[in-house]
Amino acid sequence: MASPAASGEAEAPVLPALLLFRRRLDAAFHAALRRRYRLLDFFASGEPLPAFLAGAAASPDPPRAAVVVGGGAVRVDAAFLDAIPSLGFVFSTGAGVDHIDLHECARRGVAVANSGTVYSTDVADHAVGMLIDVLRRVSAAERFVRSGLWPVQGDYPLGNKLGGKRVGIIGLGNIGSLIAKRLQAFGCVIYYNSRRPRDSVPYKYFLNVHDLASESDVLVVACALNKDTRHIVNKDVLEALGKDGIIINIGRGANVDEMELVRALKEGRIAGAGLDVFENEPKVPAEFFSMDNVVMTHHVAVFTSESRSDLRDTTIGNLEAFFSGKPLLTPVLPW
């Protein structure tokens, strides 16, 4: 039989290998990656992580890039990088990079990028929606009506207005800034805590979160998770927020001491909470389930039909930049 070259047929291009560590990937996104790369899908493989990485590393064309998701079973650390020495690029499909050792990657010359601002507007909208829900008791009132209690018990207890509330935002990055802009339009007073004051904003800066909480009616957690921000909202901060205070968390679950939050809510030491993230996902403290003053979603603040499409474009754009030796679209450097 004649070879493709001898018969004039063009050989199929050899696609570069790509490690994939993400379960929830829509069909269009998966197909777009598959057209461009030879996918080595960890979750589809069914293998333990060490065996999967060893097999990938031993292939004739070992992978130079990986796509990972936060909050999953994979942490890109020294052990991971030891197992795949060919790796030169890691893309995180979320804005958070607490699952990636940035300093170790930088030390080894492994470039890192994330979703950039793809999710920022959606998360900001979600945070504001949760705050309105908690204040006005929208979900709780909906359950009241749906269960047929309105004609039996009369009107549901009143909620509270959003306008005029003092809102303290922990982390005034892309998402925090968009939340501030939205809440300012509602007539809220914006305060913030961040790694450093920002000269470009008119909001009052607080050096520490305890002081921020003591001057706020609402705390919105919008910071990254790292060793400095783990449990940044603790018992003392919740006490400072006070019995009329509300906390909204669209950052990371471990930014808040979850057990202290449960206790504060049970004892009436704060008024309510809106939570999109939890400390041990997908496990959620059962105490929350019976609390009408707690609104919860399953870490979906980032997800809209539009953001999925934008993420696909950002992921592929970064991968193509890496493989062609061009600057990354949304690089992440060590803090």
Image (cartoon, rainbow, N blue to C red):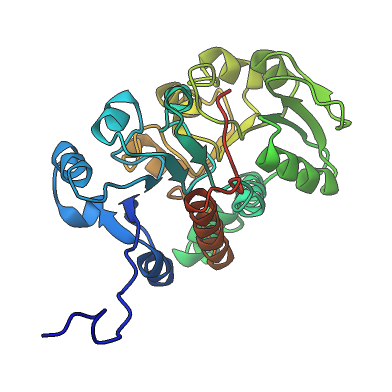
Q: Nearer the viewer, residue 101 or 269?
A: 101
Task: Please indicate whether residue 43 sits to the left or right of residue 279 in the image.
Answer: left
Q: Which residue is drawn at 26% across and 55% down?
A: 41
Q: Which x, y percent locates residue 133?
A: 61, 50
Task: Please indicate whether residue 290 sits to the left or right of residue 80 in the image.
Answer: right
Task: Please indicate whether residue 232 sits to the left or right of residue 54 in the image.
Answer: right
Is 299 rendered above or below residue 77?
below
Residue 36 is at least partly visible in this image:
yes
Is 36 rendered above or below residue 135?
below
Is 153 rendered above or below residue 90?
below
Q: Residue at x 67, y 46 (%)?
A: 159
Rendered image quadrant of residue 162: top right
Is 173 rendered above or below residue 158?
above
Q: Which x, y percent locates residue 143?
A: 48, 59
Q: Residue at x 55, y 62 (%)?
A: 313
Among all residues in the image, which is located at the extreme left? 1
Q: Quadrant of the C terminus?
A: top right
Q: Which x, y percent locates residue 72?
A: 33, 41
Q: Which x, y percent locates residue 251?
A: 54, 36
Q: Quadrant of the N terminus?
A: bottom left
Among all residues in the image, which is located at the extreme front? 6
Q: Which residue is drawn at 74% across and 39% down?
A: 177
